[in-house]
Amino acid sequence: MIYFSNSKKIFLLIICFIGLFLAFPNFSKVNIPFFPNQTINLGLDLRGGSYLLLEVETDSIKNDRSQSLLEDIRSTFRKNKIKYSGLKTNQNGIQVFIRDEDQISEARKLIQESNVSSSNLFSSNINKEFSINNNNNLFILELNENSLKEKYRSAVSQSIEIIRRRIDGLGVTEPSIQRQGNNRILLEVPGMDDPQRLKDLLGQTAKLNFRMVDTSISINEAKQTRIPSRSEILSDANGFEYLVMKKVLVSGERLVDAQASFDQATNAPIVNFRFDSLGGKYFAKATSENVGKPFAIILDNEVISAPVIRTPILGGSGQIEGGFTVEEANNLSILLRAGALPAPLEILEEKTIGPGLGKDSIDSGTSAAIIGLICVLIFIILSYGRFGFYANFALILNIIFIVGILSLLQATLTLPGIAGIVLTIGMAVDANVIIFERIRDEINNEKKPISAVESGYSKSFGTILDANITTLIASLVLFFLGTGPVKGFAVTLSIGIITSVFTAFVITRLLIAMWILKKRPEELSL
């Protein structure tokens, strides 16, 4: 075990140099060719930034599903000439009254066909999402609780992905986005010192659609008499009201790109958008059939602009003008590219951590690491002399490996992560202490230096491996079950365990072996 071939020595030397190169960018701004110049990302508690606890408004998901089914039933009944009245949503679903008793059976069949079949073939309620009950002519459709829970879980997962895309559009690095409970999302954005922009970006569901403006009647006439059933009144950011058709010409779901730009004529900030092929066809058809008429661009039930269609727009792309500032245009383009949230988000808690506090944390953590390292280095040298010097060299290399691996993985270092590194410094010498004590026992048994070293390493290997594996298992459990700071601690601890075993059994042994084989000492003073 004490002999290393030249190929092994070269291989280990390469590994050490790779670790140095990976860690180097953290201590210098000099770029190294052909190597990743990545540094460790600092977490919210070290770098400062914004913290938001968000809640997905699940009631809106329930209302949207009820409204969607209501529109489906209305369309189906009209197509099949079913006479009905009182079609409306209630607290748990929708209800409808069938006026002709001879059509009750047909109406029930159409309602069942409008929904997904249940896996329970013996149930009279054959819909997974709604239970269907009728009392004579009155049909009541109530939302299924299990189906709703599944939709809530799906909405939270979808929201996390859309939030990630929106945050990525800001150009920040390593945001932390985690699910909390059933319908909450924890968001940490290191380096983001403008929480208001973050809230503005997440405060909109970004449901975009294009509809025609109803010009058959004025706003005042609609208010004084009766708003047409096919239309509704919406307003823009300045409070100006429009009578807009409810029918959506093209949905924002068909958008494939949106970019902030400037109008060539006025130099005003605008947003250029582009549809997919099917959306482009819908848009071309809508603008061709309505030349000379105004159409509304609506975002979250607010009219952004209502331009008149001068000519058909056939290329599948266009622009949105709304008197934007540059930042508003950028934010809108990010929202449209990222897609619409399945439900609104409510901000339950927000924090802003200044970079000054983060710097104090880094300084404190660095000081603790340096003091702990110095104490360990002195103790090992005083206890084991030359062998302690080799162990100290391996310990420093161990820290470099940790920094290099964290940089390579682009992991986020938090204050608990620094605590994990400090703990690793203390734990890293455990393996060497066990090995050296075992070698000392072999020397006391009057074994030769080479035999004592070989025996010391071979007999201590199992003990050290068992101890570190159990610690590694615990740290992995913390990583998979923990959140936030706990994960940061688990990451650095796990990496530290692996690198410390490697440096103790390979690097330290290599240094000791090279010295013994070169000097051939008659005895070891350990």
Image (spheres, rainbow, N blue to C red):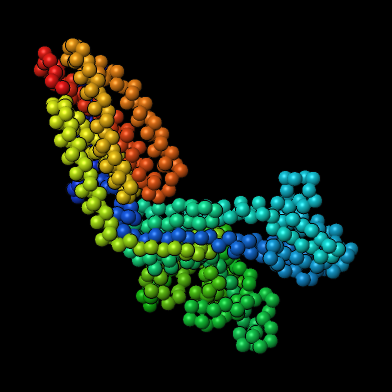
Measured as percent of width and height from the top left, residue 5 is found at 22, 18
Q: Nearer the viewer, residue 433 or 197?
A: 433
Q: Is residue 195 left or right of residue 208?
A: left
Q: Is residue 62 left or right of residue 380?
A: right
> Residue shown at 26%/33% (left/top)?
428
Q: Nearer the viewer, residue 236 or 91?
A: 91
- Quadrant where the image shows the C terminus: top left
Measured as percent of width and height from the top left, residue 279 is found at 56, 61
Q: Quadrant of residue 135?
A: bottom right
Q: Quadrant of residue 73?
A: bottom right
- Quadrant where the image shows the N terminus: top left
Total label count? 0
Residue 389 appears in the figure: no
> Residue shown at 80%/51% (left/top)?
124
447 shown above or below 422: above
Q: Nearer the viewer, residue 241 or 52?
A: 52
Measured as percent of width and height from the top left, residue 2 is found at 22, 17
> Residue shown at 43%/53% (left/top)?
177
Q: Is residue 16 left or right of residue 136?
A: left
Residue 302 appears in the figure: yes
> Residue shown at 65%/52% (left/top)?
147
Measured as percent of width and height from the top left, residue 369 is found at 23, 44
Pick out the residue farthest to the right.
102
